[in-house]
């Protein structure tokens, strides 16, 4: 398996990272940039859950090897930090020819 292009998992965060926080960041590293760019901050929690399509019936994200559940509020907070990270590093990691139109 090819390693992810992104390395948000190892970026400094605003809060201490436990195993679940690290796994959530790794989950976002594997999310395609095209999908992540579809995210809208104005979406409701239900719209975010539907968009990701990996939440369980109990409202937590389905992640392997986690100490605790990840609810949509934490998911959104970390996702938005990941989007900021990608916006900051995209030009150094992806050549202009590989970027999406309108970048």
Image (tube, rainbow, N blue to C red):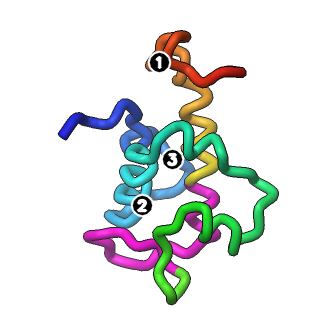
Residue 27 x/y as whole percent: 40, 54
What type of secondary structure mainly makes up the magenta span?
Answer: loop
Instruction: Answer above or below: position of 7 versus 52.
Output: above
Whether 59 is among the magenta residues is no
- Between marks 3 and 1, how big is the CA–CA gap? 23 Å
The x, y position of residue 92, in whole percent, is 48, 15
- Numbered label tally: 3
The magenta region covers 60-78
Callout 1 environment at 10 Å: few (<14), some (14 to 19), or many (20+)? few
Answer with left or right where residue 10 lies relative to residue 90.
left
In primary-sequence order, the first of circles 3 and 1 is: 3
Provide residue 26's location: percent of width, then percent of height.
Answer: 37, 50
| Label pair 2/3, CB-CB below 8 angstroms | yes
* Residue that badge 2 annotates: 21
Q: Which mark is residue 13?
A: 3
Label 3 secondary element: loop
Residue occupying the point 61% across, 62% down: 51
* Residue marked by disc 1: 94
Q: Secondary structure at mark 1?
A: loop
Residue 22 falls in image quadrant: bottom left
Based on the picture, tell me whether residue 76 belongs to the magenta stretch.
yes
Q: Is residue 76 left or right of residue 63?
A: right
Mark before the other along the chain sequence, 2 or 3 = 3
Q: Above or below — where is 25 with respect to 46?
A: above
């Amino acid at each position: 398996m090819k390693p992810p292009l992104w390395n948000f998992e190892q970026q400094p965060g605003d809060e201490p990272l436990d195993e679940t926080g690290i796994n959530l960041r790794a989950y976002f590293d594997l999310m395609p940039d095209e999908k992540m760019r579809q995210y809208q901050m104005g979406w409701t929690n239900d719209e975010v859950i539907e968009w990701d399509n990996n939440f369980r019936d109990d409202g937590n994200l389905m992640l392997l090897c986690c100490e605790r559940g990840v609810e949509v509020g934490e998911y959104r907070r970390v996702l938005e930090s990941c989007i900021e990270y990608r916006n900051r590093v995209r030009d150094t990691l992806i050549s202009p020819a590989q970027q999406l139109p309108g970048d």
